Amino acid sequence: MSSGAPPASPLDAELLAELRQLVPSDALLTAPEDLIPYAFDGTAAHRARPAAVVIPTDRDQLIAVVRAALRREVPIVTRGNGTGLSAGSLPSTGSLVVCLNRLDRILELDPANLTMMVEPGVVTQTISSAAEAADLFYPPDPGSMKISTIGGNVAENSGGLRGLKYGVTRDYVMGLEVILADGSVCWLGGKCVKDVAGFSLRDLFIGSEGTLGVITKILLKLVPKPAARRTLLATFASMEDAASAVSGIIAAKVVPCTLEFLDQKTIRCVEDFAHVGLPVSAGALLLIEADGNPAAVDAEIAVVEATCRAHHATDIRAAADAAEATRLATARRSAFSALARMRPTTILEDVTVPRSELARMVRFIETVATKHDLQIATFGHFGDGNLHPTFLTDERDEAEMVRVHTAMQEIVTMTLELGGTITGEHGVGLAKREFLPQQLGDASYQLHRQIKRTLDPAGLFNPGKVLAP
C-alpha cells in the first residue's frame, strides 16, 4: 500500500485546451489545491494526485470529454463521490479524473415495467426514496448509500445489509449505456424480463470497476415494496453462539432480508457513538429483519426467535415500531464511522466465507489480531458470510502498518483456504489487486487479462486497477 501522494504529472496541453472548450470553467480543475480532494477515496493509506479533474454536467459533455482523452491516449479514471473502499477510483499517474456526480438526474420512472433509468451520479438513497414514493422498492443498500452514487455501485457491484435475501447491485441492473475504448457508445440490455440474445455483455461491465468503459446511463429493476417488516435484536454471550444461530436460521429455510453481526468491540464503539441502547456487555449480537407478506413475516420471525433461543441467545428484543427499527439499522450502518473514532487510520476489510465457516473465520481474525498486536474489530453481513474485519491503526506508524499488511495477507489466505472470496462487495481495486491471482488461478486470471486487452487495448480505462499492469 502507498502512504504518500506522489506529485501529479502535467496533462497534455492540447487536451486541456480542448477540455476548456467542452465544459464550463468551474468544471475543469488543474490547480494543485483543487486536485487534493480527488487524490483519494474512502480507502485509508492510499493516495495519488490526478493530473486534472473534469466534471461534466450532461451526457454529451461526458462523451466529448472521454473521446478527447482517448484520442490523446490519456488515462481516464472515473469516480463519483469517492466512497470506494478498495482504492478503485484512485488516480493513476498522468490520469484525467472524470467525476460523474453532476450527472445526477433520474431520467425515467416506469411503474408499468418496474424500472428506473438514471444517470451514474445519482446518490443511491435518492433512488431508494424515489422508488418508495412510487410504492416500489430498490433493495441494494450499501452502507454508504446516503452519499455513494449508483455509477460507483454498478462499477463495484456493491452489496449491502439486504444482500442475503435480495442480492447485490448486479441483480438490479437491466441495462447500461457505456462509452467504449474506440469512443463509440453502446447500449447493453433492456426492459425485457427475459432476454437471452447474445453474450451477456451487460454483466461483463457490472463490477468491472471502470476498467472496460465509462457508464453513462443505467436501467434499474425495481420490485414491489414489502407490505411488512419486523426487526429483532438478539444478544449472545459468544460469537460462536451467534454464528451457530445463523446456521440454524438458514437450516430452518428462513431467509431474512437482513442478518447482521457485531462483535463486542464494535458493539461498544457503536453504542458510544449512536446511543441506541445496545447491550455493551454482550459477546456478540445479531440484527435481524424479515420483510414481505405480514403473515409470512410473523411466521419467519417466530422461527428466527425460537432458533436464537435454541442457540443460547441471552436476550431477544423486538423493535417496538418502525422508528426503533430504523434507529437500530442506522446504528449498524454507523459501525464504520463509530470505529473510525478509535484510531487515526481505519482500514475496513471485506472478505466472504461459506456461512458454515463463519465462526472459524472470526476466531482466526481474533488470533491474527493478538499475534500481531493489532486492534481488529469485526462486523458484517453474517447471513451471506460477508465479514468486515476492521483495522484500527495509525498509518504514521510504519512498523504497525507492516504488521497490518502481514495480518491482511494471513486473513486473505485463510479466507481462500476456507473456500471464500477476497471481496464480497467492495471490489478489488488497487487494495486487493495482489490477491486476485491467488483466488482466480492462472487460467481465469489470464482470461481476465485477455478481456481487458480486447476491450481496452491501449489500457486507458482505470489503469492498474483489478489487474496488475
Image (tube, rainbow, N blue to C red):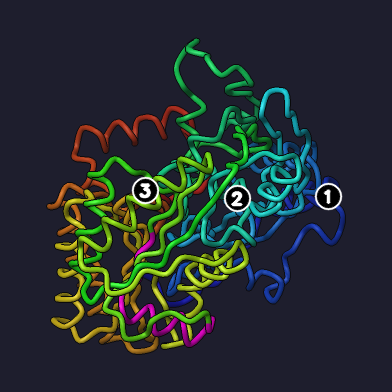
* Place of residue 251 in the rendered image (x, y in percent of width and height, measured from the top left): 22, 44
Secondary structure mainly formed by the magenta segment: helix
| Mark 3 neighbour density, 10 Å: few (under 14) some (14–19) many (20 or more) | few
Q: Identify the secondary structure beneath mark 2.
A: strand
Viewed as shown, does residue 312 lie left or right of 74? left
* Kind of residue at disc 3: Pro
Residue that mark 2 sits on: 78
* Kind of residue at disc 2: Thr
Spatial CA distance of label 3 from label 2 is: 18 Å
The answer to whether residue 447 is above or below residue 157 is above
Q: Residue furthest top?
A: 197
Residue that mark 1 sits on: 23
* Place of residue 461 in the rendered image (x, y in percent of width and height, measured from the top left): 53, 43
Spatial CA distance of label 1 from label 2 is: 16 Å
In the rendering, which numbered label is found on residue 469? 3
Start and end of the magenta stretch? Answer: 260-275
Sequence-wise, the earlier of marks 3 and 2 is: 2
* Place of residue 445 in the rendered image (x, y in percent of width and height, measured from the top left): 27, 38
Q: Are marks 3 and 2 in contact (CB under 8 Å)?
A: no
Sequence-wise, the earlier of marks 1 and 2 is: 1
Residue placed most toward the observer, 174 or 381:
381
